[in-house]
Amino acid sequence: MSTESMISPENLVYAKPELMNDNYMHYCPGCSHGVVHKLIAEVIKDMGIQEITIGIAPVGCAVFAYNYIDIDWQEAAHGRAPALATATKRLLPDKMVFTYQGDGDLAAIGTAETIHAANRGENIAIIFINNGIYGMTGGQMAPTTLPMMKTATSPEGRNTETMGNPLKILDLVSLLDGVCLATRQSVHTAAAVKRTKRMIRKAFENAMAGKGTSIVEVVSTCSSGWKMNPAQSNDWMVENMFPMYPMGDIKNI
């Protein structure tokens, strides 16, 4: 078979999404961020909304998201992405506005902004990456860190008596009337990737339809923070993260 026939459209297994730039990604091997970036780029292209989409990324591993997806981006202060998204969507109601946040951002310093934006039912989508640790700053304990999980600031494991229990913030915001979609997904298998893409699109469609706030939590890996290789991280996530953060829709109106 010739090289030309091997790369013909009918033989093409995968192609880089058109909206993904050629910049070298800074994410660690096995990190879930790159997969979710790909899905967002595909959804925006599939919906034909590149020219009207505004992404908002605050501090964290995904702070450089603007390097990878060719849309308009804004940078927010740590945790403040939902507040900035609120202002952007209200000033530009015809735009598709979404935030892209990690658990240390959305569920810690940004808890108030997350809850109040969701309570108001702002017409935005929130993509929430939950890997149970502060990945960017050295692997410290996050609000979502599991009981007895070892981190840089809980070297003997998270003691729930003194450090509290993991914060299931998706469950909390699902109780708010302003939330129309609260779903928890992952990207560790091909089937999971397909489901997550469907839910990201659903969240974007909800925002454009003015239905309220949609939150897609993606339970993710952090090979560097967990001190594991990518394969070990996937297995550990399934065995330990999923029981605490089970997959599926909590609310889907």
Image (cartoon, rainbow, N blue to C red):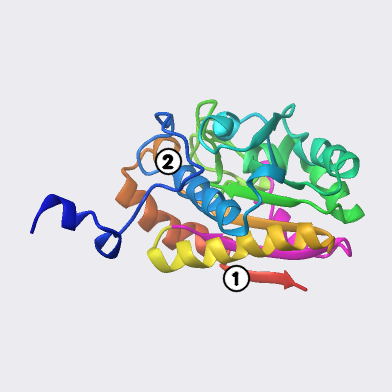
Front-most of 47 and 196?
A: 47
Q: Amino acid at mark 2?
A: Trp
Query: What range is drawn magenta here?
Result: 163-187
Q: Which image quarter is the C terminus in? A: bottom right
At 61% from the left and 64% from the top, the residue drawn is 199
Query: Is 234 rendered above or below residue 202?
Result: above
Please indicate whether residue 124 sits to the left or right of residue 46 in the image.
Answer: right
At 54% from the left and 48% from the top, the residue drawn is 41
Q: Amino acid at mark 1?
A: Gly
Task: State the residue lying farthest toward the left.
Answer: 1
Q: Residue 142, image x and y in percent?
A: 62, 39
Q: Residue 122, image x and y in percent?
A: 86, 52
Q: Residue 7, image x and y in percent?
A: 23, 54
At 85% from the left and 60% from the top, the residue drawn is 210
Q: Which residue is mark 1?
A: 248
Figure quadrant of residue 223: top left
How dense is the environment of label 2, judged by Cα within 10 Å: few (below 14), some, or many (20 and up)? many
How dense is the environment of label 1, judged by Cα within 10 Å: few (below 14), some, or many (20 and up)? some
- Tell whether position 174 is magenta: yes
